[in-house]
Image (cartoon, grey):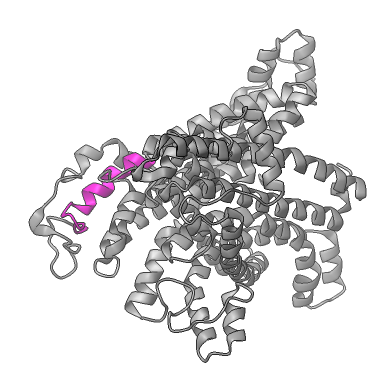
Amino acid sequence: MAELSATPPKTEDRPSALREFWYYFSENRGAVMGLWVFAAFVFCAAFAPLLAPYDPTEQFRNHILQPPAWQEGGSWAFPLGTDPLGRDMLSRLIMGSRYSFFVGIVVVCVAVTGGVIVGLLSGFAPKWVDTMIMRVMDIILSFPSLLLALVLVAILGPSLTNAMIAIAIVFQPHYVRLTRASVLAERQKDYVTSARVAGASKARLMFKTVLPNCLAPIIVQAALSFSTAILDAAALGFLGMGAQPPTPEWGTMLAEAREFILRAWWVVTFPGLAILVTVLAINLMGDGLRDALDPKLKRS
Amino acid sequence: MFGYFLTRLGMFIPTFLGVTLISFMFIRVLPGDPIIVMAGERGMSEERYQEMVEKLGFDKPVLEQYWDYLVGVLHGDLGESFVTKKPVWDEFFALFPATLELSICAMIFAVALGLPAGVIAAVNRGKFFDRALMSSALIGYSMPIFWWALLLIIVFSGNLGWTPVSGRIDLLYYFPSVTGFMLIDSLLSGQEGAFGSAVRHLILPTIVLGTIPLAVIARQTRSAMLEVLGEDYIRTARAKGLAPARINGLHALRNALIPVITVIGLSVGTLLAGAILTETIFSWPGIGKWMVDSIFRRDYPVVQGGLLMIAVIVMLVNLLVDVLYGVINPKIRRR
């Protein structure tokens, strides 16, 4: 024992949280691929007006139902062909990414904020309040999510905004349950007791002490809800209860193209493919996030 | 065990009341006067309007209205459809077999392919088969099923002409509905080719509706199998020199099945939600299409009643799954 240094052990030895996260995340090749596709999707959404060759609502009357460029009768002026009204498919798809991205962000933000707050309250509140909140969540969960969203939209009137509100309401209970379960587990731990003994207020206990330690499953669920929100919004659009024509929302585009499926495969194939690829990329990312954030599954 | 059952039932009743409250409120939070909507474009005289208000009980206090509604629901009275003037209860049970038949076929499809896929993936963990199967499962899980349905129609109905596009059976065949299940009724009718026609009509909707449950079951089976394969008793079985097929099939799968069965039970909600899209696309005369049509026709009593019935079915199935789970797994009961 020559000398004991007064300084604590160097912190550099332990990788930063972000580095550690990236280390585990990048081990999952699918997740990294998903991240790249998602980045491309976000790029598309952000710069859609610059990327799209035409206005998505402009109708080229001489080019109705023109096939994609590589097929006979197609031209590179409309690389993915045109729809029954002569609108450029590529431009509509690019603009459509905006709506899907918007739906995902809004729904996840609303559902997470609401769900986390109610879940925290439920976890800290007296037993009877907790029971009441959980029963209300059970009631919402008894309805199949798409059906409840459909009925809510029927009440509010069909539009993309109302579809987003409906989907956010339907997703809420998952976050409430998830947050409450983590809160109940964390509340027992010594660091919470010591914070309480040190005189931390209830609000501080909830948001500063406990919440950061409950975030991992919530983040994973948020990633998965992002993709489900896109799917549900597209489904509502497809049923005519989401975005209304001529909005180039992917689900609405599919609904408009339905009667042409046997004549023009491209008007049906591309919007659905766009939905599938986006949702798949986000789900791949979600799996990677779970591997990286869930300590139980980490290979130590 | 009985205590566990009672606790679970105790949770069921308040949830049921809440569900009735939501479906009761549905008609009252709608924009516009439901009676005016009911009258349609012809309008309605003042006396007739008052008569309707009285008949529907809109002049009573809200609490009394809810009580009347609840008593009605418990007696199987869900009101009458604005459009067909038939009781919603009767309409529901006339259409329900179609949805049930489709859902059962979809579930059989999902389990028959999902279980083996999950087992094969788990046994070959990290190898080509595992990756290929799990990638397909993730694609299935991410699938917008309304698009998947259109693609299948393009290929199998449009290009190959193998399957019909809509309905439950060819119009050529007519026979009385005995069970409501087209597969059984067509066999009972004894008409040549009827059963084949019913089967051909079922194929595409079954695949479409079963795709997401299939992906979920495959993923769940794989992870449950992986967990079980790491247990000591599997090592013991291996050390005893049992054949791998016996270990995987008998020892491991049996124990891996418990979480999988739960998933199967809980996907009833997913199936009913999927039925809305599937039935709409394939013009399948079931509950899902009925609900969507009613929403568009503003047939509010139907939407209200259908919403309630579907929620109650989901709740009953969840109750059943929980109770069964308690029977299989004694650890749950004590919680």
Nearer to me, B126 or A158: A158
Residue located farthest toward the left when viewing the structure as drawn: A62
Nearer to me, B257 or B120: B257
Q: In this view, does A108 lie above or below B234?
A: above
Which corner quadrant holds the C terminus of chain B?
top right
Residue B10: quadrant of the picture:
top right
* Lateral position of residue B100 relative to residue B4, left or right: left
Nearer to me, B315 or B216: B315
Q: Can residue A219 be seen in this view?
A: no
Residue A95 inside the magenta-drawn segment: yes
* Lateral position of residue B133 relative to residue A193, left or right: left
Q: Is residue A117 visible?
A: yes
Residue located farthest toward the bottom when viewing the structure as drawn: B192
Q: Where is residue B226 in the image (x, y as percent from the top left)?
A: 71, 59
Residue visible at 71% across and 42% down in the picture: B71
* Lateral position of residue B123 relative to residue A283, left or right: right
Residue located farthest toward the front when viewing the structure as drawn: B47
Residue A142 inside the magenta-drawn segment: no
Where are the magenta residues, as a range? Answer: A80-100
Nearer to me, B48 or A68: B48
How many marks are shown on the rendered structure?
0
Q: Position of residue A208 (x, y in %)?
A: 64, 18
Q: Position of residue B298 (x, y in %)?
A: 43, 46
